[in-house]
Each structure stands twice: as C-alpha cells, then as structure tokens.
Image (cartoon, rainbow, N blue to C red):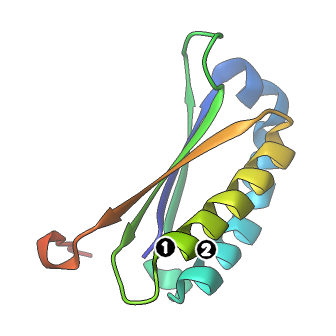
Amino acid sequence: MPLLSIAIEHDVWQARGQDLMSALPAMRAMLCEKLDVGQEFSHLSVNPVFCPKDQTLVSADLRVLGKEGRGADLLNEVAGELQAMISSACKHHASVRITTMDPAKYFTRR
C-alpha cells in the first residue's frame, strides 16, 4: 500500500506539472511491483506548493506498511528509482523520504 505525496514548487509545477502527471502511471506500476501490492491499494497525489527557493523544490513522501521482505535494501532501491523518475519528469533534483508504518497501528476505511 504505497501512499505517495509529491510536493512540487509552484513555478516548477507551472513548467513541468504535465510531465510529472504523465509519469505517475509508471511510478505507480514500479511501486506496486517492487512492493508487491495491487494498484488498487496505492494512492498518489501531487501538490503544488509555495516554498523558499533555497530548499529542494520537488519532494516526495512515500508511506508503506512494514512487511516481511520490505527491508532497508529494497526501500533504498525503491527510493532511488522513484527519485530518478521524479527528477527526470520535473527536470529538478527530487528528494524522497520513505516512512514504514506499523501494520498493527494502521487503520483505513474505504
């Protein structure tokens, strides 16, 4: 269950937003494949933001449930692929943060 939120600075959004939106299906496919989860359990969002220009202008936060086989090596690989995909689409360096959530403390209602 990858939950991906991408914050993209407003000016970068104006210039590259369509490219980023076009890249979302490939990002979802990669995340679901690497994390071994069905696409129906994924949620991706893009949020144009206003922020200081001296910080990373594109930032992704990925939240995943902890699960056997989702160790640091796999998550580092996912972070690298995601960073490359977002950076390529936006033509700006993107930062990626991954948070692993405890399944026993996570609740969702659909």
The quarter of the rendered structure image containing the N terminus is bottom left
Q: Along the line of sight, which residue is nearer the eye, 50 or 87?
A: 87
SS at mark 1 in the image? loop
Q: What's under tag 2, amino acid-wise?
A: Leu
Question: Residue 6's image quarter?
Answer: top right
Residue at horizontal 72 percent and vertical 30 percent from the top: 13
Residue 23 in percent (x, y) is at 78, 58
Query: Compared to 15, does 35 lie above or below?
Result: below
- Residue 81 percent coordinates (x, y): 73, 63
The disc label shown at residue 18, or none: none
Mark carried by residue 42 = 1
**Residue bearing the label numbered 2:** 31
Residue visible at 50% across and 87% down?
Answer: 37
Mark 1 touching mark 2, by CB under 8 A? Answer: yes
75 left or right, relative to 66: right
Q: Position of residue 47 (x, y in %)?
A: 54, 37
Q: With respect to residue 89, does 58 lie above or below?
A: above
The amino acid type found where label 1 is placed reads: Ser
